[in-house]
Amino acid sequence: LCRQLGRANVLPHEADADLASPSASAAAVSELIGRSDAVLSLLPARMHAPVARACVAQGTPLVTASYVDDCMRELSPAAAAAGVPILVEMGLDPGLDHISACELLARVRARGGLVREFRSVCGGLPSAEVAARTPLAYKFSWSPQGVFSALEQPAAFLRDGKCELVGGGDALLASARPYAVGRLGNCYRLEVIPNRDALLYAPLYGLGVAGGLGGLRALFRGTLRYEGFAAQMAMLRSLMSASATVPGGVRSWAELARHLRLLDARRGEGEAATRVRKELLRELGALSPAEKVRAPGTRTQLSVRDAFCALLARQLAYAEDER
């Protein structure tokens, strides 16, 4: 990656081949961490903890883009005692959104302002011309598995002085609302989806009174997407049962579509929604006999969800000339 980006000042380790395999030993990974100046972990969030423990043991700083979870939080005292920096939430969201939020709040306070309402929205969106020709009006700059996992997370926020909770999955996607605020909302047809527990950030942003929410009337964090994203993701989510597996004899997506009966009418689905579903599946290649069902990594058994995510990763990856 460093070579692809032309970063001559950053020299990646030439890791041994076995470190790329699922059978790589913890000792081998720890030894590599010990030889590194710093570790940037882009692993799934659930896999950060053992890497973080190895970093603390080896005295190597760690950076991740993932949210703080209980495992990472419990490791904080040991990292502090060892003098090892562990920087989390260092991506776009979470990450740059925190930086811009704190910078804005500091400007308000420097002018004697008092913050009663705070709303923050952001999202990694493809440029308008790319979105216009892309299913979902979205490109995956990160793992589709990570996107669907994020959509399973519930959300909490403050509106009109009252705490509101939204469940993950279908409830979260159904809570998406049009975003028509300011110049951005006037120029693009966007929607906003509540983003996790915004209330956790009140003390970190210095909002409220005495570490609580007193005095606040609104606190919200949201994810921006082009209009229609939530409805189409809800449709895809309904088709990709995590417990169902792809039959061994299925080789193409056309075969899998017949097996899953992806074109069959759905209970309670109107004609317009059926047309949208079929067109989306066609655009993604999920009805094509030429599109092969490819297993990610080296696993032999493939879940339907894994198959869909692998398809999305292939079909909706950014091209070199796309923004």
Image (tube, grey):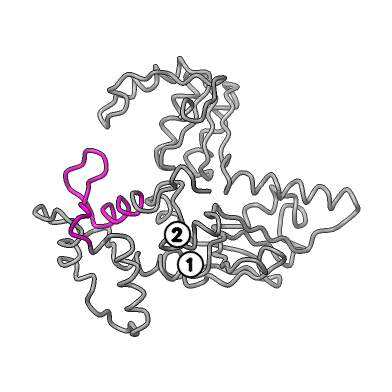
Magenta part of the protein: which range?
288-313
- Determine the secondary structure under disc 2: helix
Residue 170 coordinates in the image, percent (x, y): 42, 69
Q: Which residue is mark 1?
A: 172
> Given the image, on which type of amino acid does mark 1 rest?
Leu
Say which of 122 and 50 sits in front: 122
The residue that appears at 80% across and 59% down in the rendered structure is: 115
Asked whether the residues under the numbered discs 2 and 1 touch, taking CB atoms below 8 Å apart as contact, a structural biologist would say yes
In the rendered view, would you say 26 is above or below 238? above
Residue drawn at 81 percent across, 47 percent down: 106
- Give how far apart the Cα atoms at labels 2 and 1 are: 7 Å
Q: Is residue 171 above or below residue 90?
A: below
Query: Which residue is found at the position 32% from the left and 53% from the top?
Result: 309
According to the image, label 2 marks what residue? 151
The disc placed on residue 150 is none
Q: Percent position (x, y) of residue 321?
A: 49, 45
Q: Is residue 297 magenta?
A: yes
Q: Pick whichever, 245 or 287, lies toward us.
A: 287
